[in-house]
Amino acid sequence: MDVHSLLQRYERGQRDFSGIDLSGADLRGQTLIGVNFREANLRGVQLSRAFLTKADFTGACLNWADLQCAKLSDSKLADADLTKANLSGAFMVQAKLPRAKLAGANLSHTNLRRANLWGANLCGANLQKVNLRQANLSGSNFNWANLAEARLSEANVSGASFNGVNLSAAFVRDVDLSGMDLEGVNLTDTRLQGAKLSGANLTATNCQSAHFQGADLQGANFTQANLSGASLERANLTDAILKQATLQQVNWERAILSGVDWEGAQIQIPETPRLSFRRVEPTLSWAV
């Protein structure tokens, strides 16, 4: 079916175009609200700035599709293949994308607030400045993705993987990352206020100037991590591991540091700090 026939049928009230082959079609700026493209072949389709609210793309092939600034709120994209698709600036509030394939996709500046990305594959995707607030990201694969300046506050990330992820300057407030493997993740200037990181593996992470105010860091492993300039104000680091960590110019005000392992750490604490030290080994060097 060609584009002209599709649009004519849509104007006459037809909404079911499941299984259609529109690969490479140009539908830029078109209004296709509530359209059914289940299992359709939309590889390389041009849908930038299209109105696709409540559209159904379940199981559709959207490889290399251009969906820049498209309106996709409440849309269904379960099991859809969006590998290398361009979704930059798309409006996808409450979109359903469980198990969607988004490897290498461009989702920069995309609004995915309260979206369902359960089990989605976002490996190597560009998610810079994406809005994922209150989104369901459980079981998703974010390995090697760029999440710089992303908003993930209150998102559900249980079971998600973040190997090699860039989370610099991201907003990760009040997110439960307990027990997660975050080894080598870039957390430079990341906002982690109130986050739960108890038992998390943060070995060799770059946490320079990170914001951990009020965070739960009990038992977290910061071995060889760089926390220079980080704020740990009111953070709970009970039994945390800070072996060989770089801890220059850290804000420790009212931090709980009971049972912390400081072996080999490069630590510098201002004189007369307001800390809650209990059972801490006396191996600190005080900077005046």
Image (cartoon, rainbow, N blue to C red):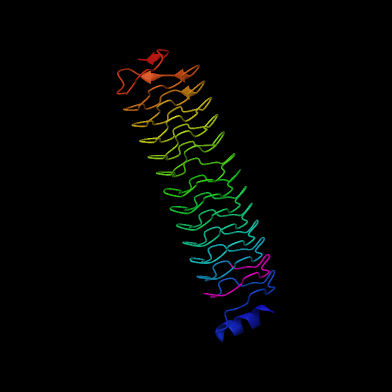
Q: Quadrant of the N terminus?
A: bottom right
Q: Quadrant of the C terminus?
A: top left
Q: Extreme bottom residue here?
A: 12
Residue in the picture at 46% in, 20% down:
261
Please say if 244 is above or below 88: above
Q: Position of residue 53 (x, y in %)?
A: 50, 70
Please say if 28 is above or below 145: below
Instruction: Return the residue nearer the eye: 243 or 144.
Output: 243
Q: Position of residue 166 (x, y in %)?
A: 55, 41
Q: Position of residue 214 (x, y in %)?
A: 35, 36
Residue 255 lies left or right of residue 189; in this view the side is left
Residue in the picture at 41% in, 24% down:
249
- Figure quadrant of residue 189: top left
Q: Position of residue 183 (x, y in %)?
A: 56, 34
Q: Which residues are magenta?
A: 31-47
Instruction: Return the residue nearer the eye: 60 or 178.
Output: 178
Main secondary-structure element of the magenta-colored stretch: loop
Instruction: Return the residue nearer the eye: 200 or 188.
Output: 200
Tell whether position 276 is magenta: no
Tell whether position 38 is magenta: yes
- How many tags in the picture? 0
